[in-house]
Image (cartoon, rainbow, N blue to C red):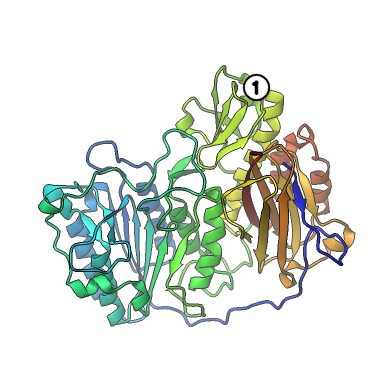
Amino acid sequence: MRLARIGTAGRRALPLALMATGLLCAATAPAAAAVYGLVVGIDDYIGTANDLNGAVNDARDIASALKKAGAARIVTLVDGQATKRAIAENWSSLLAGAAPGDTIVFSYAGHGGQEPEPPGRNGEADGKNENFLLAGYTPNGPGTAERIVDDEIYEWLLAADQKGVKVVLVADSCHSGTMNRGASATGVKFRNGKFGDLDLASDVLEMPPPDVATKSEEDTKYVTFIGATLESRLTPEILIDGTPRGALSWAFSRALEGAADRNRDGNLTQLELLSFLVPAVEAEAEGQQTPQISPLRPGDDPVIGRIATSGAATPAAEAAGADLAVAVVGAAEPRIGEVAHVEVVTDPARADLVWNRTTGVVEHRIGGPVAENVGSFDDLRAVLSKWSALAFLKDNAGVNPAELSLQSGNQTYRVGEQVHITMAEPALPYLTMFNLPPNGRVEFFLPANSREEAVDWRERVFSERFEVKNPPYGAEHLVAILTEEPMPALHAALKQMATPDKAAALADTLRSLLAGKRFQVGIAAIYTSGS
């Protein structure tokens, strides 16, 4: 498909709608006191049906990031260590040692669930409590105690709030529902679990007093809740640098390491977390997840202080990262291994992309179908270069994302439907923007001329609508790269890639021309269909 821009009446047809705006600069906030961490990650559940692959990776990454950030004390509980008793006792110990103004980061990566609210409590509009399901959980008998229900968590949070201790609760789990689009690959793990219905008759969990059921994070002054996605959506495990992960935990770790600290003052506010986590997670998860922060309290008060920070305006580009993993359904294609930064794997569940030679469809393990009519290796080469380039860009979006947002939603767009894209407050001035259609060619948008090369996008607002018109359909990726200086060599190279055969060099070109430079990346994944 070609993204067709919808023109603005009465103006010269530019690729963008330009509006002047003032920069919003956060005032420097006072440094926070000590930071503590209670970090939980569970892969190994009873039996094998509910085992995960990336939750322990998440816990260890967050613990490492907290250590780099100078946390005073970190408790890490993984798999069988993460019992209800161990979590509760360590929470109480951390809270007892924390002073007013300190912050406790409580992160959980593992299965979440929903269960009927006990009679007479009436705290939930849908009649269901949310929970964290621990390693020893079973839906009946003594194992029912190995879960943490939201009423219990609220009781813990209220105790911290009354003491004046800040809490950042990170829940990399899900409860029920669907995805924005269906995931295609077999073997994708979702963090909702299939444990069967809770047997209320044999439930041994003691619930907090009934009045707690009416409470939520909205009733607190110092609590920040960060969820992996909407309650009605599933949370998949994804591959980042070839390793199973939760996208939220991965991005939160980078935030703790300083990537979210936009004003470089050594503190993190809610708005800094929100503006970093949303584009970073959406880029890695192909728009299948949008983190949620509540209650959102706009302002300069830090929720986490004394974090590690480089003091630079933006970090430099990272190394190339892991190779793109590709699996083939049907006869093997030996030439795939000749494509730079691409690795052939035999297990589709371990692949980023799966090419079905019979149907000609290429699927992303989380995003779904991304290209069609790919009948030969010649057709495939540009598709692989596109996704290898995206892997490099996504790695760097996790260092310093630009807020390129799909305002019209992350659904599948059909012919005639409009796509609304916005970008907010970039930190760097010079914008390069292009689209990558499903077949891998490059549609170059900005800058359109030498005058536009000098535009400072820190003083502009990007808001544009496109219409779905022509094939090929699948996954479009609108890419924004913001740099400290104009990039005429990059612009010239991208303009030469208007056909798939010329675009096979895309991945190497981006790696070469951006190596060692400071830049921001925004990626909007736009999935389309002709039907």
Residue 175 in view in this figure: yes
- The residue tagged 1 is 335
As drawn, is 430 to the left or to the right of 178?
right
* Quadrant that contains the C terminus: top right
As drawn, is 454 to the left or to the right of 130?
right
As drawn, is 228 to the left or to the right of 503?
left
The residue sitting at 19% across, 47% down in the picture is: 139
- Count the numbered circles shown: 1
The residue sitting at 41% across, 55% down in the picture is: 232
Mark 1: give few (<14), some (14-19) or many (20+) Cα within 10 Å: few
Q: Position of residue 167 (x, y in %)?
A: 35, 71
Q: Position of residue 186 (x, y in %)?
A: 44, 33
The residue sitting at 51% across, 81% down in the picture is: 29
Q: Position of residue 138 (x, y in %)?
A: 19, 46
Determine which quarter of the picture holds residue 463: bottom right
* Quadrant that contains the N terminus: top right
Residue 515 in view in this figure: no
As shown in the figure, which amino acid type bears the numbered disc 1? Arg
Compared with 366, 399 (above or below) is below
Q: Nearer the viewer, residue 203 or 502?
A: 203
Q: Nearer the viewer, residue 397 or 498?
A: 498
Q: Nearer the viewer, residue 283 or 29?
A: 283
Q: Position of residue 14 (x, y in %)?
A: 83, 60
Q: Secondary structure at mark 1?
A: helix
Determine which quarter of the picture holds residue 95: bottom left
As drawn, is 418 to the left or to the right of 4?
left
Q: Residue furthest top?
A: 331
